[in-house]
Amino acid sequence: MTVVVQRSFTIERGAGAEFERLSREGIWPYMEARGCRILGLFANMHGGSSDELILLTAYASMAHWEATRDDAPLPEHASEEARRLHPAYLEALQARRRLTVRTSSRVLRLATDWAEWPRDVWSG
C-alpha cells in the first residue's frame, strides 16, 4: 500500500534556498534511487509560518519508508546508483540538519476508495 509522508521542517530564517538546494542536489537523488517519489517541497503562502517548509514524499509501503530513514544503513542490495549517491546524501543531510530548527513527520494513507494512486509511481 502506497504511503505519503508529510514532513514539516521549521528552518532558520532566510535558509529556504539553501535547504531546497541541499535537498534537490544531495538528498532527493539518493532517495529516488532508493525508490521514493518526491512529490514536492512547499512553502506557506497563508496560514502558517514563513520559516516552515512541507515536504511530501511517496513510498511503496510503510516498510519502504522505514527502510529509508536517515539512520538506516545502505542495504546490501542497493543499486549502483544509490551506492554512488550515498556519500553526497550523507553530506547534504548533515548540512540540512544544521539549518533545521525542528522537524516532524506524518505518514498518510489514501483514505478514499474512489481515488486511485497513479499506476506509474511504481512498476512493481
Image (tube, grey):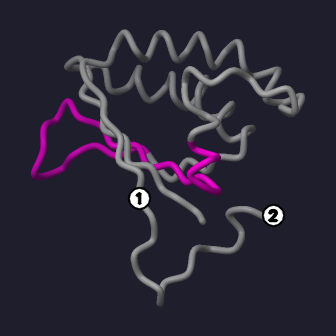
Q: Is residue 40 magenta?
A: no
The residue that disc 1 covers is: 108
Residue 84, image x and y in percent? 82, 20
**Residue type for callout 2:** Gly
- 6 and 42: which one is in front? 6
Q: Which residues are magenta?
A: 41-65
Image quarter of the N terminus: bottom right
Q: Quadrant of residue 61?
A: bottom right
Left or right of 108 in this view: 13: left
Helix, strand or loop status at disc 2: loop
Residue under the point 41% across and 51% down: 107
The residue that disc 2 covers is: 124
At label 1, counting other C-alpha atoms closer than 10 Å, the crowd grade (few under 14, some 14-19, many 20 or more) is some
Residue 103, image x and y in percent? 30, 29
Residue under the point 72% across and 19% down: 86
Left or right of 114 in this view: 103: left
Image quarter of the C terminus: bottom right
Q: Quadrant of residue 91?
A: top right
- Residue 22 vertical position relative to residue 24 in the rendered view, above or below: above
Q: Is residue 54 magenta?
A: yes
**Residue type for callout 1:** Leu
Residue under the point 55% across and 54% down: 58
